[in-house]
């Protein structure tokens, strides 16, 4: 029972501080802010993290890097088509963003969540360079998976033979990151539009 209490305390600490950090940035959150929002004492907070930066690191690992890992974001068979992969990818994006919105709170407009999320990601490279390298490695894994799916599509005749898997992997990745940034300036991430754009590229390269 005591272990469960510790786990629930840690989960609540992470959830609340994630919301504070994502909406106010790292510098905009103080330990007293965390104490007030969580109801935990300073001693309890520092039981789970050595410093505020350490707490930020753990929260980023759990809510950002872990959830953005392509191996957890989507589930597809090893022989899926590119068209199937696109559908699963967009569903994974929508599921991930909805999950984060639920954590932050539905009282916060979705557009503000998207904008704040991108701001948090940008802070990683400045405050946590070691996690920035982890983040880049995850992006490379994702691009490699796109490349493999496209190459398989060429082999089975789903896609044209005169295309470069590496180039189109970058195209699909750019559509996601470009849409994430552009939509953050408006109403927030639009998975339907992302899918339409990816399917438009698919129509160009399909066999």
Image (cartoon, rainbow, N blue to C red):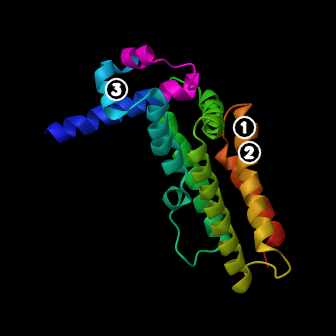
Q: Is residue 49 above or below residue 190?
A: above
Separation of residues labelled 2 and 3 (CA atoms) = 37 Å
Q: Say which label, 3 or 1, has the lower sequence index.
A: 3
Residue 17, quarter of picture: top left
**Residues at discs 3 and 1 in contact (Cβ within 8 Å):** no
Distance between the Cα atoms at labels 1 and 2? 6 Å
Q: Going by the picture, which residue comes out furthest to the right?
A: 162
Position of 70 compared to 54: left or right? right
Name the side, left or right, on which 3 lies relative to 155: left
Residue 31 colored in magenta in the image: yes
What stretch of residues is rendered in magenta? 19-36
**Which residue lies under the disc numbered 2?**
179
Query: Residue 183: which disc?
Result: 1
Q: Which residue is mark 3?
A: 45
Q: Residue at x 77, y 70 (%)?
A: 166
| Marks 3, 1: nearer the viewer | 3
């Amino acid at each position: 029972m005591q272990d469960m209490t510790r786990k629930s305390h840690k989960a609540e600490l992470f959830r609340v501080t994630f919301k504070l950090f994502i909406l106010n940035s790292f510098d905009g959150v103080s330990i007293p802010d965390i104490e007030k929002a969580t109801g935990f004492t300073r001693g309890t907070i520092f039981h789970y993290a050595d410093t505020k930066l350490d707490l930020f690191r753990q929260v980023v690992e759990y809510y950002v890097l872990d959830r953005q890992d392509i191996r957890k974001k989507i589930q597809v068979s090893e022989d899926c088509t590119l068209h199937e992969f696109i559908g699963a990818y967009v569903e994974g994006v929508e599921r991930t963003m909805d999950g984060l919105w639920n954590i932050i709170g539905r009282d916060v407009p979705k557009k503000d969540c998207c904008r704040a999320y991108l701001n948090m990601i940008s802070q990683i490279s400045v405050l946590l360079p070691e996690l920035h390298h982890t983040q880049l490695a995850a992006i490379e894994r994702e691009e490699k998976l796109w490349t493999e799916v496209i190459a398989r599509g060429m082999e089975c005749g789903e896609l044209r033979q005169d295309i470069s898997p590496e180039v189109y992997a970058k195209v699909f990745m750019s559509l996601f990151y470009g849409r994430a940034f552009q939509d953050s300036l408006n109403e927030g991430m639009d998975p339907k539009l992302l899918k339409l754009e990816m399917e438009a590229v698919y129509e160009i390269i399909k066999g």
